[in-house]
Image (cartoon, coloured by chain):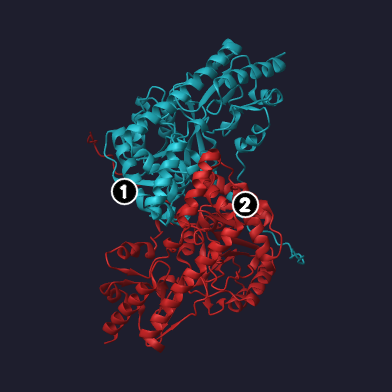
Chain colours: A red, B cyan
Amino acid sequence: MPVTLLPGPFLDFPLNPLVGRLESSAIRDMLAVAGRPGMLSLAGGLPAGDLFPVDRLARVVAGLLATDPGLALQYGPTEGHEPLRAWIAAYESLRCGREVALDQVLVTAGSQQALDLVARTLCSPGDTIVVEEPGYLGALQVLRAAGIRLVPVPVDADGLDVENLAVRLAAGLRPVAVHTVTSFQNPSGTTLREPRRRMLAALADRYGFVVVEDDPYAELCFDGRPRPPVRSFGDRVVTLGSFSKTVAPGLRVGWAVLPQPLVTPVVRLKQAADLHTSALGQAAISGLVADRRWWRGHLDTVRAGYSRRATALADALGDVFGARLTLNSPSGGMFLWGRFTDGTSTAELLPRALDRGVIFVPGVEFHTGPGGEGTLRLAYATNTPDGLAEAARRLRDAHAGLRG
Amino acid sequence: MPVTLLPGPFLDFPLNPLVGRLESSAIRDMLAVAGRPGMLSLAGGLPAGDLFPVDRLARVVAGLLATDPGLALQYGPTEGHEPLRAWIAAYESLRCGREVALDQVLVTAGSQQALDLVARTLCSPGDTIVVEEPGYLGALQVLRAAGIRLVPVPVDADGLDVENLAVRLAAGLRPVAVHTVTSFQNPSGTTLREPRRRMLAALADRYGFVVVEDDPYAELCFDGRPRPPVRSFGDRVVTLGSFSKTVAPGLRVGWAVLPQPLVTPVVRLKQAADLHTSALGQAAISGLVADRRWWRGHLDTVRAGYSRRATALADALGDVFGARLTLNSPSGGMFLWGRFTDGTSTAELLPRALDRGVIFVPGVEFHTGPGGEGTLRLAYATNTPDGLAEAARRLRDAHAGLRG
């Protein structure tokens, strides 16, 4: 029974200007269009739902609620569910060939939250962080929300151009941190090569910045051999990981491996932010990964599924565009990155593509300034090989309409 | 196969001074002691695990994963699971007698995250928020993390002393927001009376601040009649709610009802912070509350369980202390608040209580400055009536040791 109140004097609401300036992610806004009937989407960053281990998860959750419901339902420690933290510490120790202690592992609501907490811990508003260009939109957004000045450094076929970074550091650039998606980067699909990983760790030691190594795609390596993280080569590194691509993103479980001096402040900020990550999600994933034999088989299945789709899309695009479109060679992750060699502007291509029933993200969206006009990001994870072939044909028709 | 690396030059890690100053919650630190064998804890803020609807949740989750796993496992909208938001909008509309629109509802990782997002949206570092004294520690912590200046206003038997606030506003105090736990306050157990709710809403309109009405205990009303929220009486109000006390906190599902001008900035900050709240938790709770008949019965069961424990503890304390300890009359929520009338310092009582195997939180912990020396917070939710009677006897023995 709503009642009508007299309006107040319409004072403005107070607003932190940093937050007031935040813009919605362009990709999020486009996802609304991606849901139109018949639309084939190469735009979103959704992992492949048909590869989620649904039955196994259902059994684990049922077992958990039947035997130890408090573990899944009661308040838990801010740092995370201890068996899961121990599993992550062992995994990260093995992966980087150096011991990661249990207390360095913080479980977070996806690696997105880890990035938010780490950025807010390291930086005051006005501080500088180096970001990749093209770079991950979610990172740019969270760093802007914290009032951080973003300095872009280019990404080439070998990942972040660390030589370029070294020149700028030598010329006086003093970032608090460098953010890099090290394996199968979003959006470009490139992987930071090992000599650059070593050099980046050495630069962090020399100039006193922190490498924030964002590695959610590490296990989506088609060859089954995850790369040694930057943390293998130095101590001034935060590594962010996630179960969003290997299990399911809806559970919102990721993690940060923190250098010892950062553990206490980041954990306290996490406590203030949300007390702890979903206990049900943590306990469910802990139950899944505890069976190492099953987990290895599951990762093989996921890698094969992504590899098949990546190849299908690359082949289909090669068939329809030939040399007019160059692609990174798909070796892992969720994205192909294309570059038109015929002067096509992908921002101009997009509305014609939407008319034809296919959607992608123009490369300009991943730049902090101008650049990337001829490039585009193509996500293959949620499509079948047949769907990807059809998407390539629709792109061809859209391109023909634009260029004709 | 850990290898030894040469140490770096030991540059300090960069650190945001606001975050560096954060202290761990005193209650969290004490919970470690609470876990000692034989310890009876009146200290923590855990809800009653034996009242969690475990079997029902297990059935809902099993059904969900069998029929629509994508809903629980894939990325979802930042604003939250739409059927759950619609349920919350209907609940809040009914409760305050005015329409709450779907788009005003944001689902968050508990009401703790909602408070973090709202505070960061409204305030820049250095801005002022009025907090309650004694007040909720988690709120003080999250506001300090955002660099906000805290101005305490006392709580009396009728909740926040709004008349005191009015005097200070008239004298020039200009807060960005006022944070108040309106029903069965943590720690004092008091409820803001309706005339004060009206007056607070009117003051917000006159002085242009925002009331952040934190209401996680609303449904734990022993008389089954939740109070009309402050939002019933004005538009400059954010209402925070939670399923942590009515379903289970480990799912981390709460919400904010936002005035229209705050919707877009808070949602964008949430997107940067963690993309969205656990889809599994949201879908599970949505499935639970959709059965209104079951939900009403469940709330009755929970209220009766809490009421029984509150009465048992109040009776037992009355038996052992008589007039030396005054208590708020338990009418809802999770806490009794006591005040010794014989000059006992509860901070001095605590170590003797620990020796006797019982733990509580001294009232001084809930103050931003001095005060509350004779007071203490007593949480009854996780104990049986027999355990509460034993806890009262141990407190009596500790008190006798101190005073004798």
The relative height of residue A301 versus residue B99 in the rendered view (above or below) is below
Q: Which residue is mark 2?
A: A85
- Asked if the residue at tag 1 contacts the one at tag 2, i.e. Cβ–Cβ closer than 8 Å, the answer is no
Residue plotted at (68% across, 58% down) = A100
Amino acid on which disc 2 is placed: Arg
Q: CA distance from mark 2 to mark 1?
A: 37 Å
Q: Chain of mark 1?
A: B
Q: Is residue B308 visible?
A: yes
**Type of amino acid at the residue the image marks with label 1:** Asp
Toward which corner of the image does residue A128 lie, by quadrant? bottom right
Q: Chain of mark 2?
A: A
Relative to A404, is A200 above or below? above
Q: Residue B380's spot in the image, x, y percent?
A: 54, 25
Identified at 63% across, 54% down, the residue is: A87
Vertical position of residue A322 compared to residue B89: above or below: below
Percent across and percent down for residue B121 are 43, 50
**Which residue was labeled with disc 1?**
B103
Residue for point 70% across, 22% down: B356
Q: 10 Å neighbourhood of mark 2: few (<14), some, or many (≥20)?
A: many
The residue under the point 55% across, 68% down is A180
- Within-10-Å neighbours for mark 1: few <14, some 14–19, many 20+: some
Q: Nearer the viewer, residue B305 or A130?
A: B305
Q: Same chain, marks 2 and 1? A: no
Q: Quadrant of the N terminus of chain B?
A: bottom right
